[in-house]
């Protein structure tokens, strides 16, 4: 298999909406199907977009998870009968043509006495990972839990006799990590599945086992029921080995529905059905079983609008432990990959392959610890972010959320000037995410209208320094009323500055605390009925506080106003300021900016109304 990874610097603009969690509501509404439910293409279940968004929310926010490939393949650890077997370690049964009965002997030697679920979960947590996906059963068919449906499992076929998945399930609950299972549809051990195909257990879809339906009905599905009901609630069921001839898209759909009927909010990968395109893992057109795409050992060149995806990847060249694979990726490479993926709107599922003793290899632990150190300072730029708005950035990557851009600088500018393709005016301030004092970085622009951030001469973090850009908030757009008037209320204004803010209650419904004359307010509104309008300002000002002068600007026109005493901070009056002409339909800004503030405050501003003048 190919171990190439793509880290192309092209991006796509991806926009996803996030909805607050309401899993209870989701489950209820799932049971009571709304008459007008819009059926999404991705799911076989009646689920509308909002319900799907709620179900996917934790996963989309998590961005970083741990894959654990573990089982009896860690006993041979890449060597069979004294020979080093090429390829990925968990495939040794297939690669070395090991007969079932012989392979079963490894199960008898699988006694991972050093396994400590808490330790593993801590390693994931400290790395900043939010979920763990462990192989409940890999292609070799060995089960890591106490299955009542079969006896090729940790209790009945190995000397260990501890329920590994139960211990992990308890630990994950304790440490608030989501537990997820990888489960292979292909099974090289079960006589009704691929076992009789020895020595080609994986014949790439050539042959059928006439009893495969029985395996699905009496073995695989009951086992999945055990996993969901006894070890859940689960985060994800991560299927694999779906390419065999015996597996079809309708079976995939049926399995998807089956696991979701057992746990309605469970998330299922696209390998449940036949929809994945090779190792790139994206779902083909027209297929819909599964909730997310699964690129394996590669990162897509761009993000994909509206597609949930997760790249799974090894830290060396094997998933299951191989004693002699020391080809570890560097810390820098791993952090860059995590960020590259986040900048394209995907998740990173990074693998560890523990030994037959139950130890996660030291090389993996070190890298995870170091990723954790970076995450401890910078995870705000990963969790809950969405894809970069930029096509390409020569120095690194960008992630974004709620009015902030996170610039991940891989290549630090030697001249101390970081160029960002954004207008200077779109940005309020910039600071280093890892610096607690959030000292503001100097902002400027070049002749081509690019933002220039002046940064320290030396990179504060050699691997990846994150610079936060806080963007100007965009005011909501107010529409014109039927009569053509536009009422801009304080509650809809965006306030820029340090002191002024919206206040309400006790007769107040206005911009107040306006004690800094540099603060100003801005609205956006839409005009369909053009014409000439009277601009009316509703405000209040306590006796003795008046006299501030201000400018109301709209559509390139300015009207001057002077605040008079109205008798109290809640004694509102409406004053006509003058007329403005709006000759084209469109979206406009209206701002109110103080010029002078001779006393303690500017005013309490309740609203600005544009009233059309009838001819
Ligand atoms: O569990 C790990 C591996 O053991 C398993 N997936 C990860 C997560 C795996 N890696 N490689 N393979 C399985 C080999 C499968 C390759 C192929 Fe195909 C199957 C080539 C042709 C059929 C996948 C499906 C690529 C094209 C179609």
Image: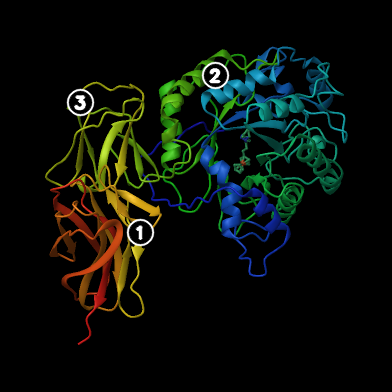
User: Where's residue 120, x and y in %?
Assistant: 63, 21
- Nearer-N-terminus badge (2/3): 2
Quick check: 313 left or right of 358? left
Disc number for residue 542: none
Q: Residue at horizontal 72%, vertical 50%?
A: 260
User: Where's residue 103, x and y in %?
Assistant: 79, 23
Q: Is residue 450 visible?
A: yes
- Nearer-N-terminus badge (2/1): 2
Mark 3 crowd level (few <14, some 14–19, many ≥20, 10 Å Cα): few
Q: Which residue is mark 1?
A: 492
- As drawn, 299 above or below 305: above
User: Where's residue 535, x and y in %?
Assistant: 21, 70
- Which label sits in the foreground, 1 or 3? 1
The quadrant in which the C terminus is found is bottom left
Q: Is residue 321 visible?
A: no
Q: Quadrant of residue 381?
A: top left
- As drawn, 297 above or below 504: above
Q: Does the beta carbon of the residue at mark 2 sit less than 8 Å from ligand 1? A: no
Disc number for residue 364: 2
Mark 2 crowd level (few <14, some 14–19, many ≥20, 10 Å Cα): many
């Amino acid at each position: 298999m190919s171990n190439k990874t793509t880290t192309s610097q092209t991006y796509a603009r991806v926009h996803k909406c996030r909805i607050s969690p309401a899993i209870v509501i989701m489950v209820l509404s799932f049971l009571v199907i709304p008459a007008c439910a819009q059926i999404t293409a991705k799911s076989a279940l009646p689920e509308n977009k909002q319900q799907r968004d709620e179900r996917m929310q934790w996963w989309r926010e998590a961005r970083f998870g741990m894959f654990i490939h573990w089982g009896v393949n860690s006993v041979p650890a890449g060597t069979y009968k004294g020979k080093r077997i090429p390829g990925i370690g968990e495939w040794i049964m297939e690669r070395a043509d090991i007969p079932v009965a012989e392979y079963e002997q490894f199960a008898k030697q699988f006694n991972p006495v050093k396994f400590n679920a808490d330790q593993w979960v801590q390693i994931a947590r400290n790395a900043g990972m939010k979920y763990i996906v462990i192989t409940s059963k890999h292609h070799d068919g060995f089960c890591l839990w106490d299955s009542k449906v079969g006896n090729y499992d940790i209790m009945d076929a190995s000397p260990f006799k501890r329920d590994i998945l139960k211990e992990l399930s308890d630990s994950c609950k304790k440490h608030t990590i989501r537990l997820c299972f990888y489960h292979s549809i292909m099974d090289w051990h079960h006589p009704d599945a691929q076992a009789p195909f020895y020595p080609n257990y994986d014949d790439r879809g050539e042959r059928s086992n006439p009893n495969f339906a029985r395996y699905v009905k009496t073995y695989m599905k009951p086992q999945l029921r055990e996993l969901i009901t006894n070890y859940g609630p689960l985060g994800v069921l991560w299927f694999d080995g779906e390419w065999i001839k015996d597996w079809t898209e309708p079976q995939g759909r049926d399995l998807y529905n089956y696991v979701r009927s057992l746990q309605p909010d469970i998330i299922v990968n696209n390998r449940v059905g036949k929809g994945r395109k090779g190792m790139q893992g994206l779902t083909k057109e027209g297929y819909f079983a599964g909730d997310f795409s699964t690129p394996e050992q590669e990162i897509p060149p761009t993000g994909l609008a509206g597609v949930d995806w997760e790249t799974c990847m090894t830290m060396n060249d094997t998933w299951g432990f191989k004693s002699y694979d020391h080809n570890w990726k560097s810390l820098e490479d791993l952090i860059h990959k995590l960020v590259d993926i986040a900048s394209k709107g995907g998740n990173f599922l990074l693998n560890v392959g523990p030994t037959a003793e139950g130890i996660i290899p030291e090389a993996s632990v070190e890298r995870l610890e170091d990723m954790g150190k970076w995450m401890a300072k910078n995870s705000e730029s990963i969790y809950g972010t969405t894809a970069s708005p930029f096509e390409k950035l020569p120095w690194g990557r960008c992630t974004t959320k709620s009015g902030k851009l996170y610039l991940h600088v891989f290549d630090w500018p030697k001249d101390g000037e970081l160029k960002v393709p954004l207008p200077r005016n779109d940005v309020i301030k910039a600071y280093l995410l890892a610096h607690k004092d959030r000292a503001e970085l100097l902002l400027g622009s070049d002749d081509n209208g690019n933002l220039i951030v002046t940064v320290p001469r030396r990179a504060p973090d050699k691997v990846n320094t994150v610079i936060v850009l806080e963007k100007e908030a965009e005011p909501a757009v107010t529409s014109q009323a039927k009569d053509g008037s536009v009422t801009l209320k304080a509650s809809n204004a965006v306030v820029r500055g340090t002191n002024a803010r919206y206040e309400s209650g006790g007769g107040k419904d206005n911009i107040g605390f306006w004690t800094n004359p540099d603060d100003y307010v801005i609205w956006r509104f839409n005009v369909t009925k053009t014409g000439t309008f009277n601009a009316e300002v509703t405000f209040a000002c306590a006796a003795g506080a008046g006299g501030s002068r201000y400018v109301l600007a709209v559509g390139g026109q300015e009207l001057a106003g002077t605040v008079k005493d109205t008798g109290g901070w809640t004694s509102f009056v409406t004053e006509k300021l003058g007329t403005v002409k709006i000759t084209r339909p469109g979206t406009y800004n209206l701002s109110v900016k103080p010029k002078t503030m001779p006393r303690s405050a500017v005013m309490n501003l309740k609203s600005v109304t544009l009233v059309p003048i009838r001819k």
